[in-house]
Image (tube, rainbow, N blue to C red):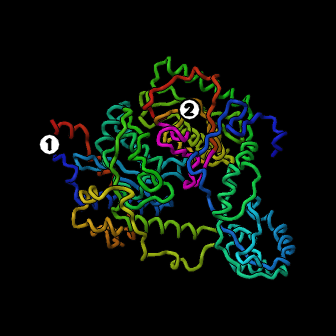
């Protein structure tokens, strides 16, 4: 993690664009409604606040939920006592364990409760800080949390350009060969960046079928590779599905393929051409699924759209094709 | 000869037969270490079973080898080098699957234009036919000809049995975990079943058409229809060692050419 000002990449934090080329694709809906998490609170005498602050200092690094974006202490309604957020219920769930932890200190407390809900992460604007502070619990403003997410991404721009050049050239050739579905994807193994699996849409080949989209074909060929390695006993034990793979694809994936990538546990997908009607990643494509960012699903992945015009040789497809 | 082409000529008795096959196959999957989800494809006009599938994710090392994809592969092998024949055939098939298709499978079934989907219980984590998303009713998932359309998908056939098989699976998993729970039977709930909010999947009209007017009250009360209100323990507690053979025989009966000749 580098400091924002030391990041060698040029990042436009407002527009969420990296190096003027890669647009971070997020679910734009529900940005004004926070995800909530519950915390343990106690009430104390103001004179005990120093002890409580020491306690918070000693636990905050162990808590899996960061509470940096909230104020820990607020006055009770009668203004005589203080209500304090001590730890998240994710960190310690059982009341008895919390009591044990508190008893190990000499804090005098009352009304231990796990009924307070706070936003899981801070809001993107200062205006929302005021709103959420009123609605949930007092918050502090440390800037847009997405800035840190953007700053923490790792990009090898040269590598990305090289791969996109490869798949765009194959895509162009497929069209001239008469393939009505010149859609191409590249799968990059996180453990070995030289191991690149290229997959071409096979709907148009002789024994293909309507579901043989490039991403499905790629997932199947990686599984085949892994099965072969397993039988040859060369299997790397850390290989599991397409865990942490980066996928590069010429056209925005459809609902089937974007969900297949969720099932395959990939890390990142970069695509070039949006599919306005059938795409399932951009918030304004198709039904606005943003499949990579759906919190109900058990895993998520990063998505970026390439904005530069370097790969304009990728054929534009009919609107009503699922990719 | 033409068979009646009435959408509503399916009665609950025939649903029971087809979904019964799928439940048995799911039990077989459970007994062989796979997730207990399975499906049966039925050729609509001849009413014959033409394909079947069960989860194969562990064995195949892919996250996408779901029951529906395995059955689709079987259909594909009937049409070597004939993608158009394959597509047309899928349009003539009805899917019976024990658990609501996940979003990926829902999209695959929609792109292949399957005639109708019947399922047992909803899929709270991934369901693509009404629980998490409604791919079958959406505008962005088009069929292989690029046509936007709505596909019917109906839940509730052997719903409790499908839920029980999943519960058996999770209890089994606990046994393998490093810290197995001691009183397993305590965790295996055999008496309580969640309600089903039918309106997530279909409207009142379709419900009446599918399950008959005598069942209409269940749409509001969100419980199982009469024919599936008592759990068939015998169905899910038996073992089905021969089911793969039996299903192979069933699907072999179906010869597309013969059927085509009949139609002429």
Q: Is residue A87 magenta?
A: no
Q: Is residue A6 left or right of residue B88?
A: right
SS class of the residue under badge 1? Answer: loop
Question: In the rendered image, is residue B111 in sight?
Answer: yes
Residue range in magenta is A278-301
Quarter holding the N terminus of chain B is top left
Whole-angstrom CA distance, mark 2 to mark 1, is: 44 Å
Q: Is residue A200 left or right of residue B22?
A: right
Q: Nearer the viewer, residue B137 or B93?
A: B137
Q: Nearer the viewer, residue A249 or B90?
A: A249
Labels 2 and 1 touching (C-beta < 8 A)? no
Reply above or below: A124 against A210.
below
- Quarter holding residue B244: bottom left
Residue at horizontal 51%, vertical 24%?
A316
Give the percent coordinates (x, y) of residue B27: 42, 63
Q: Which mark is residue A199?
A: 2
Task: State the residue position of label 1.
Answer: B2
Q: Is residue A292 magenta?
A: yes
- Quarter holding residue A129: bottom right
Q: Nearer the viewer, residue B162 or A98?
A: A98
SS class of the residue under badge 2? Answer: strand
Tag 1 subunit: B
Reply above or below: A272 against A26.
above
């Amino acid at each position: 993690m580098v400091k924002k000002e030391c990041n060698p990449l040029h990042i436009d934090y407002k527009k969420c664009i990296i190096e003027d080329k890669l647009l971070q694709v997020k679910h734009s809906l529900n940005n004004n409604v926070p995800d909530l998490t519950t915390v343990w609170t106690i009430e104390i005498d103001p004179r005990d606040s120093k002890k409580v602050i020491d306690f918070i200092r000693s636990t905050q690094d162990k808590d899996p939920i960061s509470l940096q974006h909230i104020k820990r202490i607020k006055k009770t309604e009668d203004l005589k006592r203080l209500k304090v957020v001590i730890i998240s219920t994710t960190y310690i769930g059982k009341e008895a364990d919390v009591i044990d932890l508190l008893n190990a200190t000499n804090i005098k407390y009352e009304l231990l409760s796990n009924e307070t809900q706070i936003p899981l992460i801070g809001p993107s604007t200062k205006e929302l800080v005021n709103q959420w502070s009123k609605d949930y619990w007092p918050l502090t403003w440390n800037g847009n949390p997405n800035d840190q997410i953007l700053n923490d991404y790792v990009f090898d721009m040269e590598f990305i350009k090289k791969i996109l050049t490869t798949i765009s050239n194959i895509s162009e050739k497929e069209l001239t060969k008469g393939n009505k579905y010149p859609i191409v994807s590249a799968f990059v193994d996180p453990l070995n960046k030289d191991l690149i699996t290229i997959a071409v849409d096979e709907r148009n080949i002789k024994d293909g079928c309507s579901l043989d989209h490039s991403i499905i074909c790629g997932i199947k060929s990686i599984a085949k590779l892994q099965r072969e390695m397993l039988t040859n006993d060369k299997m790397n034990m850390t290989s599991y599905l397409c865990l942490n793979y980066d996928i590069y694809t010429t056209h925005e994936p459809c609902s089937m393929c974007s969900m297949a990538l969720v099932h395959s546990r990939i890390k990142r997908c970069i695509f070039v051409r949006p599919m306005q009607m059938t795409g399932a990643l951009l918030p304004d494509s198709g039904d606005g699924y943003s499949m990579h960012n759906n919190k109900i699903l058990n895993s998520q992945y990063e998505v970026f759209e390439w904005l530069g015009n370097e790969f304009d040789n990728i054929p534009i497809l009919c609107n009503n094709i699922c990719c | 000869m033409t068979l009646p082409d009435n959408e509503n000529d399916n009665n609950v008795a025939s649903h029971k037969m087809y979904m019964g096959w799928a439940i048995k196959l799911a039990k077989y999957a459970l007994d062989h270490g796979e997730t207990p989800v399975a499906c049966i494809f039925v050729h609509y006009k001849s009413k014959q079973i033409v394909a079947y599938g069960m989860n194969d994710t562990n064995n195949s090392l892919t996250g996408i080898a779901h029951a529906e994809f395995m059955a689709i592969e079987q259909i594909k092998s009937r049409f070597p080098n004939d993608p158009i024949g394959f597509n047309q055939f899928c349009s003539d098939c009805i899917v019976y699957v024990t658990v609501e298709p996940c979003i990926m499978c829902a999209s695959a079934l929609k792109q292949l234009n399957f005639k109708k989907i019947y399922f047992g219980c909803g899929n709270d984590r991934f369901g693509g036919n009404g629980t998490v998303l409604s791919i079958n009713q959406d505008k962005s998932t088009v069929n292989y000809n690029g046509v936007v359309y709505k596909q019917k998908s109906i839940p509730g056939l052997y719903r409790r049995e499908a839920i029980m098989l999943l519960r058996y699976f999770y209890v089994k998993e606990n046994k393998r975990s490093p810290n197995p729970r001691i009183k397993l039977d305590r965790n295996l709930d055999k008496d309580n079943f969640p309600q089903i909010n039918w309106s997530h999947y279909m409207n009142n009209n379709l419900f009446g058409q599918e399950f008959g007017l005598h069942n209409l009250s269940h749409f509001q009360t969100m419980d199982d229809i009469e024919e599936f209100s008592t759990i068939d323990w015998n169905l899910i507690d038996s073992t089905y060692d021969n089911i793969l053979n039996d299903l192979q025989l069933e699907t072999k009966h179906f010869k597309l050419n013969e059927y085509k000749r009949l139609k002429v």
